[in-house]
Amino acid sequence: MILLHVPTFSLAAYAQGDSFWHRLQPQVRLAVALLSVLGAVLLPEGAWNYWGLYAAVLAILVLLSQVSPVALLRRLAVELVFVGVLLLTILLSGRGTPLWTWGPLVIADGSLLTFASVLVRSALSLWVLNLLTLTTPAPSLLQALAGFGCPALLVRVLESMLRYVAVLVDELGSMQRAAQARSGARAARWNILGNLLGALFLRTYGRGERTYLAMQARGFAGRFPETDARPWRPDEWLITTAAALFAVSTLVLAWWPL
Amino acid sequence: MVEELHYSYPDGTAALRGITLALGAGENVALVGPNGSGKSTLLLHLNGLLLPGRGRIEVGGKPLSASTLEFARRFVGLVFQNPEDQLFMPTVAEDVAFGPQNLSLKGEKLRECVRSALEQVGLEPARFLQRQSFNLSIGEKKRVALAGVLAMEPEVLVLDEPSAGLDPRSRRRLMRLLAELPQTKLVATHDLDMALETCTRTIVIDRGQVVADGPSGHILADRVLLETHGLELPLSLSR
């Protein structure tokens, strides 16, 4: 699912805000987001009350972070359409007592419950991840990953990929316009697009080579420098601990009710 | 100093055929020549990105070889023609810090070095440090690329087509900046007016060989020489 977010990484439209959420360093925001995703996803099927609780907490977080609910909903809507289509197989798996039949398609109560539960889990996870990507620029997010022990080389490769997405999109755009200008067609045809992508691949290769030369020119000898991270403040520890406690206690209460 | 430098590309095309030149400390030298004359290939040799096929290069008094690469890369700062090739880190701060970090600079010293490099190229650190690299104008990208090299405090600056693609105001700003920088400079360019204004000496190369080397006022006024080698008089001299 995270792949769906890649194009939106650079569009951290609410990254400049000044709120309680923004004052947390990216690593803390990432930790809180991951804990919430983990907590919401591991709840048992049909844990509606607990998911309601998560939704309430997230709603408060949205209000606090000053992100426009409309912007958030717009992203969620696009992503949930994808998720919904993928989940249709669960809905139509026909587990349990049939509720509705139409030819070979059967919706049964068991599969409906699983479908709804997975949908709610996805919606909550996407909600918190969108909040994170809307408020945190991609480079900071990747740095936060490095802070959690993700290999530095992997983080740098991801950073470079994101850095050059805009350049590649620009190049593709200008090649496409150049092709259109000489083809007379209103839109590029598929075979032209194929050639463009081939040329783009070759250019990417050349650019990679030149970028590497430029890195060497500035003394790069195969090892990326470490980045210095700021230690967490007491309130950041407190918030992360609270998020962890919230996740664990809802899990315990939902799986082993009193 | 470059002596009898030869270089052929892997496909056998000879790019440099016996280049000999020497740069004195504090000199401002323009390197001009038609497309494909070997300018960029020569520049890549100067801080060891390409090693000579035949001939000798001496940087800061030391012969260039695999063992002196680190020194050469610190001594000679190379600014690439296309800033997109050079600015590969996501933010301006990280990109400018990349070179000095490779020289093991850390903490407050590193931050100070980044800020001072940005100030040298006329970019306000407060406004630019956290800007994302892809989100800058071409003029700003060029200046950040230059800052990234200045942050390594090189003795010699080698610039490949610094004024290409700049609007007149940015070009003028760049020329002022080049005039202010104290380093020895070698500027490969097709912008002969800029060469005339900012460089006291001009070297013309064609087909991998030095064909003329002398005071800019003399070389860049020689219409026959320039036209023989695919160039033409600077606008300011052709009126």
Image (cartoon, coloured by chain):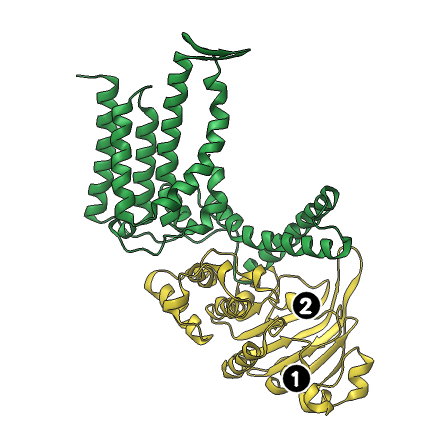
Q: Which mark is residue B40?
A: 2
Identify the residue at the far left of this view.
A258
x and y percentages locating residue A223 in the rendered image = 49, 51
Instruction: Give left or right: position of A119 versus A186.
Output: left
- Label drawn at residue A234: none
What kind of element bears circle 2?
helix
Q: How many marks?
A: 2
Q: Secondary structure at mark 1?
A: helix
For label 1, count other residues whose C-alpha is less than 10 Å away and answer few (under 14), some (14-19) or many (20+): some
Q: Give the CA distance from mark 2 to mark 1.
A: 20 Å
Q: Amino acid at mark 2?
A: Ser
Colour assignment, chain B: yellow
B144 horizontally vs B51: left or right? left
Residue at (48, 56) in percent of width and height: B89
**B176 relative to A195, above or below:** below
Q: Nearer the viewer, mark 2 or mark 1?
A: 1
Question: Is B84 located above or below residue A40 in the figure?
Answer: below
Quarter of the image that includes the C terminus of chain A: top left
Residue under pointer 1: B193
Q: Chain of mark 1?
A: B
| B55 horizontally vs A18: left or right | right
Label 2: chain letter: B
Colour of chain A in the rendered structure image:
green
Mark toward the start of the polypeptide (2 vs 1): 2
At label 2, counting other C-alpha atoms closer than 10 Å, the crowd grade (few under 14, some 14-19, many 20 or more) is: some
Same subunit, tags 2 and 1: yes
Q: State if disc 1 and disc 2 touch (CB < 8 Å).
A: no
